[in-house]
Image: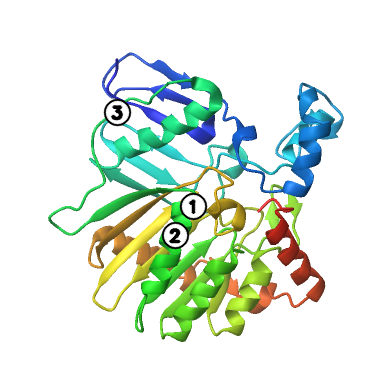
Amino acid sequence: RLPGVLLASSFFMGIMISNHLKEVTIFMCRIYNLNRLHDSNPLYSILWRLLFKPWGTGPGHAVQNPLGKGRISLRSGFKMLNFKANHRKVVATEKSLLIGSANPHSASSAHWNMALRVDGAGTELACESESAILKISGAGGARAVRLGGEVSVSPTGNCVELLTERKIKEKVLALLEQAESGARIDLSMFYLSDRDVIRALIRARQRGCTIRVILDPANDAFGRIKNGIPNRQSAAKLVKAGIQVRWADTHGEQCHVKTLYVEHADETAMLLLGSCNYTRRNMNNYNGECDLALTSPATNENMRRARRIFDRWWGNQQGRNYTVEYKIFEDSSLRRRFRAWLMERMGMGTF
């Protein structure tokens, strides 16, 4: 038994490793059983379960693979339209826990991403959480190695929390509702469409919070041009309420960051980041998701770094263009607004 564990539920496998040791051992290899997840696209999924699921997927060349090179079977395409995913990005060792937004995918290597590494805390909860993934994927009573280390409050006032699925939404809403006049709220997000989150942001602005939002313009997707849904419609609601919005200045890549920073008037702050987009599918127990929340004094180096990064993006510092004005991708189309609302409500979109 080696003391190190790498858990990567969205990588489809885990590998036991140990620094300074020659041995490398496969810890567990399981493909996440997506069929066990709740149907986020129920109108379609009911038909799929009745007509297509019994026939499986299998190899084929009927349609172009929308996620990469080559072609896939028609049955695989039908299964994909359920829009289910284990979206977590988790790495845990005996020393550290790493939670981020990056996918281990060559085509995603140019995307904007952010991660938080915690040393000496959180690994046990991460392993317990990944054990649940293994169990529902057919690993029986399999359990991840317990490495020790718990979420805790240090003498310096730092506290870290590991959050999954619906708990992420509850944390986001609590953070926004607790922010009073004078609080600073910085949000960088790949997809924003959850109505509860948008309303909470607007209420925080009405209470006197300073809010800045950077969104991906939903313009690029691995060589394909997108129509801006849902971000441009969500941004219109925020701007109408007086919230400042800028777009990531992307050129083929995506602003794949999912980060919320809240700093209160008493100079305490919280940084929340990970895999979770602020959408119905990501926040309402449909996808597998994992975030870390760090609470600390605003003088903490991690908090200062988070502020510096956001300020650099917002102000296009260091002679580089990171973001552009809202009007560049402004969209007032009523047809697309209705389409975005319908896709969010019914789960018929990929976001």
As shown in the figure, which amino acid type bears the numbered disc 2?
Glu
Mark 1 lies on residue? 166
User: In the drawing, does residue 219 fall left or right of residue 293?
Assistant: right
Name the secondary structure under disc 1.
helix
Which numbered marker is on residue 136? none
- In the image, what residue type sits under mark 1? Arg
**Quadrant (top left/top right/bottom left/bottom right) for the N terminus:** top left
In this view, which residue lies farthest toward the left?
Answer: 155
Q: Are marks 2 and 1 in contact (CB under 8 Å)?
A: yes
Residue 59 drawn at (x, y percent)? 78, 21
Query: For the residue marked with disc 3, what is the amino acid?
Result: Arg
How far apart are the two marked residues, 1 and 3, measured between alpha carbons? 24 Å
Which residue is drawn at the image coordinates 31% and 14% (left, top)?
Answer: 22
In the drawing, what numbered circle is on residue 146? Answer: 3
| Picture quadrant where residue 264 is located | bottom left
> Mark 3 or mark 2, which is nearer to you?
2
Q: Is residue 45 above or below residue 274?
A: above
Residue 196: percent from left, percent from top? 55, 68
Comes first in the chain, label 1 or label 3: 3
**Placement of 132 over or under 241, stated as above or below:** above
Front one among 110 and 347: 347
Between the residue at mark 2 and the residue at mark 1, the CA separation in whole angstroms equals: 7 Å
Q: Residue at x 65, y 58 (%)?
A: 251
Can I make out residue 321 in this image?
Answer: no
Instruction: Measuring from the top left, give residue 72's x and y in whole percent.
Output: 79, 29
Residue located beneath label 2 in the image: 170
Camera-side residue of 191 and 308: 191
